[in-house]
Image (cartoon, grey):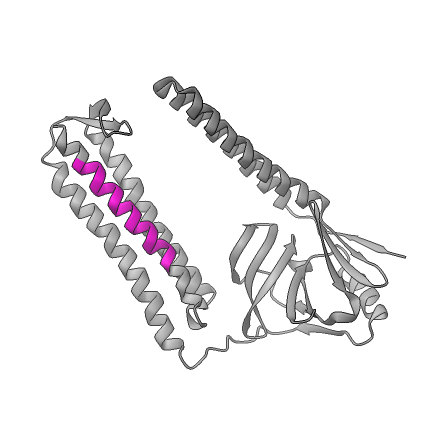
């Protein structure tokens, strides 16, 4: 006999649906704006293929949200989401932990992470340690951590609609399970090398900001040398095919710089202030992402401005 628990209701389904609709509108706008300019059928087909793949992925995420459920049978805890079912042997479940805090404190490794919908691999603070958790969660005030040995230690995060009944049924099937409530958040347990890792994270953050600053200085140094009419768009062979007022360059370059600085600041805030991942082994390495993006944007700025200078 199996007992089915639906996920706790949240606004996650609405959010992911709105995001999908926004992406559809944005992609349609891009296609209708670009195609009249390029008039290239093969490129249009490629763009439509990418468009369909993205919509299919987000449609799967929407379906996964509304069909998510947790099934307890005599032998397994089944976590059903979308087209996949995760099986956890009941006998391998060691603990069921009910966290006291009702907000997310961690960082996403891969998957969906929006309010009311957490699906995928996450780093989560459990009992003072950052653990890798497979989350299939909606409403965080229903969150349960399932610790299992299968054969190595794993954590799963679920949000059944009836939390207490779920724990009772699971405990009846395996008397060795330790139901546990984290009444107070456990302080983060920083390793001895934490100060060194914090410096690495801060260094990477400063590097990304400096690279964005270099891009800004380089742009301003060339901008005031340009005439009012400059090339704004180039073909693949770097031949200009559209000219306009140089003021338009400010919007393009500003996007590169603001995005680079904004991403660096946001990631550093979460890594250092919210999650303390910079105090864990290799946790600070996530700051390499904004550094790489800042390098890419700096290269784009240099190439764009050099090509603009070449045709004025």
| Rendered residue at 80%/61% (across/down) | 76
For image coordinates 35% across by 54% down, the residue present is 290
Q: Is 254 displayed left or right of 226 in the figure?
A: right
Q: Which residue occupies the foreground of this view, 76 or 206?
A: 76
Q: Measured from the top left, where is residue 85 in percent x and y?
A: 72, 52
Give the x, y percent position of residue 75. 83, 63
Q: Residue furthest left?
A: 225
The rendered magenta stretch, by its main secondary structure, is classed as helix
The stretch in magenta equals: 288-306
The answer to whether residue 231 is magenta is no
Image location (x, y in percent) of residue 263: 37, 51
Q: Is residue 308 left or right of residue 151?
A: left
Depth order, front residue of 177/86: 86
- Look at the image and tell me in which quarter the N terminus lies: bottom right
Residue 258 sits above or below residue 226 on the image:
below
183 in relation to 133, above or below: below
Q: Nearer the viewer, residue 141 or 49?
A: 49
Can you say which quadrant of the picture contains the C terminus? top left
Residue that lies at the very extreme toward the right in this rendered image: 1
Tell me, yes or no, if residue 272 can be seen here. Answer: no
Q: Report x, y in % for residue 35.
A: 40, 21
């Amino acid at each position: 006999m199996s007992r089915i628990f639906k996920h706790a209701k949240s606004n996650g389904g609405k959010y992911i649906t709105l995001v999908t609709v926004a992406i559809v509108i944005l992609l349609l706008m891009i296609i209708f704006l670009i195609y009249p300019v390029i008039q290239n059928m093969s490129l249009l087909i490629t763009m439509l293929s990418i468009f369909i793949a993205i919509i299919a992925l987000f449609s799967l995420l929407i379906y996964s949200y509304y069909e998510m459920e947790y099934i307890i049978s005599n032998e397994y805890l089944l976590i059903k989401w979308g087209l996949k079912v995760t099986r956890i042997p009941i006998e391998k479940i060691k603990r069921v932990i009910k966290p006291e805090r009702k907000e997310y404190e961690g960082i996403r490794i891969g998957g969906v992470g929006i309010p009311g919908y957490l699906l995928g691999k996450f780093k989560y603070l459990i009992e003072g340690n950052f653990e890798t958790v497979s989350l299939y969660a909606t409403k965080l005030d229903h969150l349960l951590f399932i610790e299992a040995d299968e054969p190595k230690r794993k954590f799963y995060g679920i949000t059944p609609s009836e939390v207490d009944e779920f724990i009772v049924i699971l405990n009846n099937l395996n008397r060795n399970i330790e139901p546990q409530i984290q009444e107070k958040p456990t302080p983060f347990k920083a390793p001895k090398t934490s100060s060194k890792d914090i410096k690495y994270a801060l260094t990477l953050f400063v590097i990304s900001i400096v690279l964005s600053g270099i891009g800004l200085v380089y742009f301003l140094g060339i901008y005031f040398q340009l005439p009012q009419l400059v090339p704004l768009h180039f073909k693949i062979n770097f031949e200009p095919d559209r000219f306009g007022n140089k003021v338009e360059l400010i919007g393009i370059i500003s996007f590169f710089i603001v995005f680079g600085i904004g991403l660096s600041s946001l990631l550093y805030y979460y890594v250092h202030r919210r999650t303390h991942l910079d105090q864990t082994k290799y946790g600070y390495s996530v700051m390499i992402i904004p550094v790489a993006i800042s390098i890419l944007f700096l290269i784009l700025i240099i190439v764009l401005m050099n090509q603009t200078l070449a045709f004025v």
